[in-house]
Amino acid sequence: MLKQCARLCLKLGLLGGNTLFVDGSKVRANTSLEAHWTEDRCRRRLEQIDRRIEEVLTECDRVDEAESGSGFWVRMPPELADQQTLRSKVAGILEQVQASETGAVNATDPDCVRDRRPRSRIMVPSATVAGK
C-alpha cells in the first residue's frame, strides 16, 4: 500500500524523489497485558494520535514557511488543489496502472521496470532486464 501511495504521489508531482524517509518502528510480537484494548483505551489513544498529528503538521507548516524561498521543496501543482481535477488525474493514473503489463507505473521514468532478479531492489531501464 505504501509503494502504491508513493508511486501515486510521484506521478502527481507531489514528491521530488530527493529525500528518503525510513520508518524504524518496532512492534512487539508477543501477547501481554498491554495488548488488551478497551473502548476507552482506544478512544484515549486516538485522541493522543490526533494531538500528535496536529503537532507534526504544525511543525511541518513552520518548517515549510521557514524554507519557502529555498527552491528545494516540490510544490503542489496549482491544478491539484481542485478536488475534481485531482480525482480526474488519479483516475487517469489508475487507468495507466491497470493497463500496464506489470500492474505498476514508474512516475519518474516510464521506461524503467523493477529488476526481478533475486536480491534486486532497484529500478533499471527495461532493456537491461530484457538483456539480463
Image (cartoon, rainbow, N blue to C red):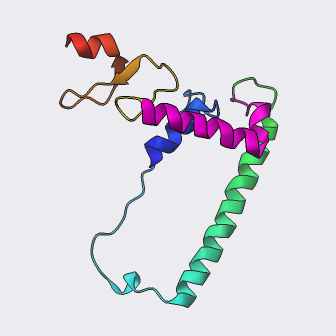
The segment highlighted magenta reads: 73-99
Q: Main secondary structure of the magenta part?
A: helix
Vertical position of residue 71 compared to residue 63: above or below: above
Q: Is residue 92 magenta?
A: yes
Question: In screen coordinates, is 13 left or right of 65?
Answer: left
Q: Position of residue 61 (x, y in %)?
A: 77, 47
Residue at horizontal 65 percent and vertical 76 percent from the top: 47
Q: Is residue 67 visible?
A: no
Quadrant of the drawing holding the C terminus: top left
Res. 128 image quadrant: top left
Rendered location of residue 12, percent (x, y): 63, 33
Q: Quadrant of residue 85?
A: top right
Question: From the viewer's perspective, is 122 left or right of 130?
Answer: right
The residue lying at 52 percent from left, 38 percent from top is: 94
* Residue 46 among those drawn in magenta: no
Closer to the camera in the image, 121 or 131: 131
Q: Position of residue 56 (x, y in %)?
A: 67, 55
